Image (cartoon, rainbow, N blue to C red):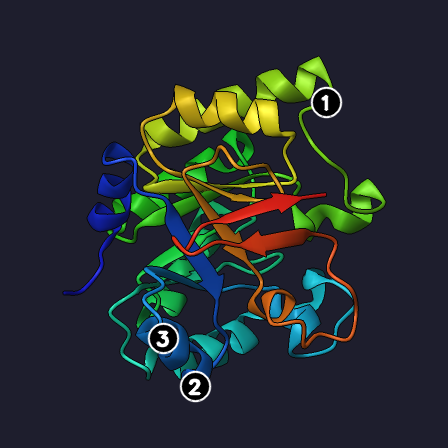
Amino acid sequence: MKITVETIRAMKGRGEKIAALTAYDFPMAKLLDEAGIPLLLVGDSLGMVVLGYPDTTQVTMAEMEHHVRAAARANPKALLGADLPFNSYGTVSGAVENARRLAAAGAEFVKAEGGQAILPQIQAILAAGIPFCGHLGMLPQHVREEGGYHIKGKKDAEHQALLEDAKALTEAGVFAIVLELVTPPVAKEVSEAISVPTIGIGSGPDCDGQILVTPDLTNNYSKPPYLSFSFSTNKTWVLSL
């Protein structure tokens, strides 16, 4: 049975943990789908682990479309989504146009980084009929302006902003929210405060699911991951910094 955004949303209600991994091409999407992973993401992390860029900010729309098409050819039962790359959703019209390009390439949802600051873009993408996954906490596309990768939620202002952003995105109609490098207590609080699933990466065990960059999981990436992890038999991950 084909997995949809409604399937992923319903998993939270059943208390069923959501396993998610990145896939950048046909064979990996095929393999992970056959393993039963319900959610696959063509992440802009491909810039670092496939294309050799120093971070995600150099990934282009054309590169994302290329890899989405490759992964989509696997025709997975899993829900397949894609990141909107850096500088592709700075305006409402640009966000919708680029979301449509990724959808045309085979993405069944799109993801972009940010909270209320990009709410108009999120609303417009949803109005265009394209499902949306939020991304809060550490935002890799902002790594240069923030001077590195930093854990979010330690400060009261960050804590409150995460809660407010998560609630705003939920009200807008996103089907899930990735929480990256959020302190585990805050990630737990956010997860309990909203009705849609949270998908953690480096945010502790209390999110509704976990996502990993697959080359980090398989240890075939030349640079060490900034996350450590353990894999359990029920297809959920516990990540720690």
Please tell me which residue is depicted at 47% across the width and 36% down the height of the picture. Answer: 207
Q: Residues within 10 Å of mark 3 (few under 14, many from 20)?
A: many
Q: Residues within 10 Å of mark 2 (few under 14, many from 20)?
A: some
In the picture, measured across the screen, residue 237 lies left or right of residue 151, that is: left
Residue hosting label 2 = 27
Please tell me which residue is depicted at 39% across the width and 68% down the height of the picture. Answer: 101
Secondary element at tag 3: helix
Residue furthest out toward the front: 233
Secondary element at tag 2: helix
Q: Which quadrant would residue 54 be assigned to in this image? A: bottom right
Structural distance between the alpha carbons of marks 2 and 3: 17 Å
Structural distance between the alpha carbons of marks 2 and 1: 40 Å
- Amino acid type at circle 3 is Ala
> Nearest the camera: 138 or 93?
138
- Amino acid type at circle 2 is Pro
**Labels 2 and 1 touching (C-beta < 8 A):** no
Location of the N terminus by quadrant is: bottom left
Residue hosting label 1 = 154
Please tell me which residue is depicted at 85% across the width and 45% down the height of the picture. Answer: 147
Residue furthest out toward the left: 1
Mark 1 or mark 3, earlier in chain: 3
Of circles 1 and 3, the one toward us is 1
Residue hosting label 3 = 105
